[in-house]
Amino acid sequence: MEYPNNHKAIVQDLMRGKFILSSEKEFDTIKTNEVFYRNFFSESFGMDFHLSSEYACLVSSQTHETLSRTICIFFAILCYELDKDGKNFMDCLQYNEFEMEEIDTYFENTSYIDLVRATRQLEDAEKRRMLIDTMRRRNIVERTGNDRFVFTPAYKVFTGFAMDLSRRQTNGKEHMVAES
Amino acid sequence: MQHNEPVSILRFFTHHFDAVKDLYDYQIANQSIPHHVFLDVIDRHKSDVGQRFFDYKILRLSGEEYVFRKEFFDLLQYLYQTFRPVLPETIDKYNQVFGDLFRQIIQGLSLDRDILEARIMEIMSQAGECISHVERNTFRLLTESRELKANAEKMDYRSKLQKATFWIDYYIVPLNRILDVNNPSSVAFTLSEISEFANRYRLNFADEGIRRQFEKLYVFLMEVHNNLIKHSRTLTNELLPLIERIRTESAILSGWIHFLKNPFRMETPTMIKEQTYQVYASDMYYQTKEFFEQFETSDEMIIEDDEQDVEKWIYHKNMYRDKLLSQLPIENFFEWAATEINAEFGITQTDKLFTLAGLLFEENLQIEFTGKTSTIETSQASYTVPNVKIESYGISQ
């Protein structure tokens, strides 16, 4: 059987929880072989394969809930603070380059400081750098310098989640995690 | 009611414009002007000409309060550009008007020329009103959207989202439909049909006067058509993206703020755990080969049990219980247990010591903790244990 080009790299990246972006060469292969990959990941690993016009990723019941929650808190506070600062947060996420110092200023002065302190991966500057590095490994951010980065289109997974939450709230269908 | 020269009315309007403006502002905010407010305004501007507002038909009575007459109200709206957007349904009504007039013109082409001329002029007049409503709406919607973007009213995100959705659903999208020249039920489409008709008859009609009217109608409708296209473009290219963006931004922020209220109880997006195993390990072929080869062995195998016999200790609970009861009272239970094990096996083993400790849970043993501790040495370790005193067995008398 012939496998698509870059098959090994595609499988390895997606299995590591990376988003494959439309700017990467593997993305063209994925797009051409969408049905194959959908079946491949479903049959081999029981995972759902998600493909949008900007990225591809895997969705599974075996989730890294803590990381996902931390990243959601990160984006929620960042968007809120950028808006409060009079900036167009959607443009910022899409086009701006961020400096870690700028991120630190937002997170140290936010009115959500208690939540920042209570979230281990956000509590101080060093932990936040580690979180950005984790996000880099997953292709959610791209480093542009020592202490600088830009967001990749994968951030839309999280802003989409916020929009969905707003819609569910309007429709009165919130999904809460059951209390243990 | 006396007849007034237009110039007198305009002069009055100009001289007392401050009072007019105050009354207009009040009506914009409160729909109508109560008598005492009217008197206050007139008094504040030291004007003794209150009655002239009625002589010149600037104000009229509405119930027990006053309102500006429509003509003056429209003029002031125009001067201050403070139009309230008209519901698209109102603009859409013109489609019916144009349709009816157009039908009547077609049917009456060979009939009375005067009524034909009047109908042509009426179409122009109605088209003028219609384009005026469209212009005002576009202007007002742009102002509203920009104010919403700047959040001049300091609205929360949810209210902003609701307002943006309101403008889109009830004004912008329906207005865009009305201005869509490709939609056969739109005002723009009907006007373009009339324009084509006028174009045909401006060159081909027996009566020269009517030909001139068709010519005027054609030129006017071309202008209206261009205006409608211009407004449609403003709606599609500027207004809709702007307000859609406000809606998206507000929805995202509203969602985040809701999330931040209870971030540890909300379901979050699924992110798969990083898989630690290598699906495509470089030595996968050999590993797989080795795995399958183990099942290919067909030789008979005999597995010998090389386990050495170990003397198994069977815990006779009743025996130790009887021993314990026969020696009551016991000052230090663990010391007693260690001595018993040592006497029986020549060595104090930890597991046996703790097995015997189970006797302490026997019912009806009168146990007392002295609060002191002692050290018990077993073959494996040294234990600090509490001094447990057993007084008697059974319910004390």
Image: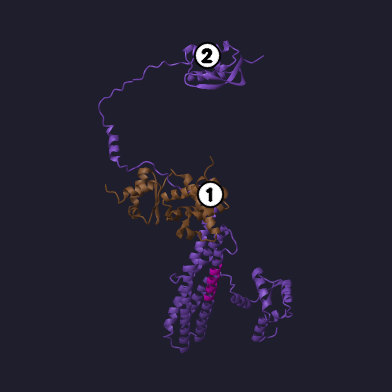
Chain colours: A brown, B purple
Q: Dot 1 surroundings within 10 Å: few (below 14), some, or many (20 or more)? A: some
Q: Residue furthest bottom?
A: B208
CA gap, disc 1 to disc 2? 67 Å
Per the image, label 2 sits on a secondary structure element best described as helix
Residue B306: % across, % down: 34, 20
Q: Is residue B397 magenta?
A: no
Tag 2, which chain? Answer: B
Tag 1, which chain? Answer: A
Q: Amino acid at mark 1?
A: Glu
Instruction: Identify the residue at image location x=60%, y=13%.
Output: B329
Compared to residue B209, the image places residue A179 above or below, namely above
Residue B380: % across, % down: 47, 21
Residue A73: % across, % down: 51, 50
Residue indicated by mark 1? A174
Q: Is residue B139 magenta?
A: yes
Relative placement, left or right, of A48 versus B141 is: left
Tell me if residue B173 can be seen. no
Compared to residue B328, the image places residue A76 above or below, namely below
Check whether the beta carbons of the residues at disc 1 and disc 2 lie within 8 A of each other.
no
- The main secondary structure of the magenta stretch is helix
Q: Amino acid at mark 2?
A: Thr
Instruction: Identify the residue at image location x=60%, y=77%.
Output: B79
Compared to residue A99, the image places residue B380 above or below, namely above
Per the image, label 1 sits on a secondary structure element best described as loop
Quadrant of res B311: top left
Q: Residue furthest top?
A: B326
Relative placement, left or right, of A139 versus A164 is: left
Range shown magenta: B131-144
Tell me if residue B39 can be seen. yes
Residue B339, label in figure: 2
Q: Dot 2 surroundings within 10 Å: few (below 14), some, or many (20 or more)? A: some
Q: Are dots 1 and 2 on a single chain?
A: no
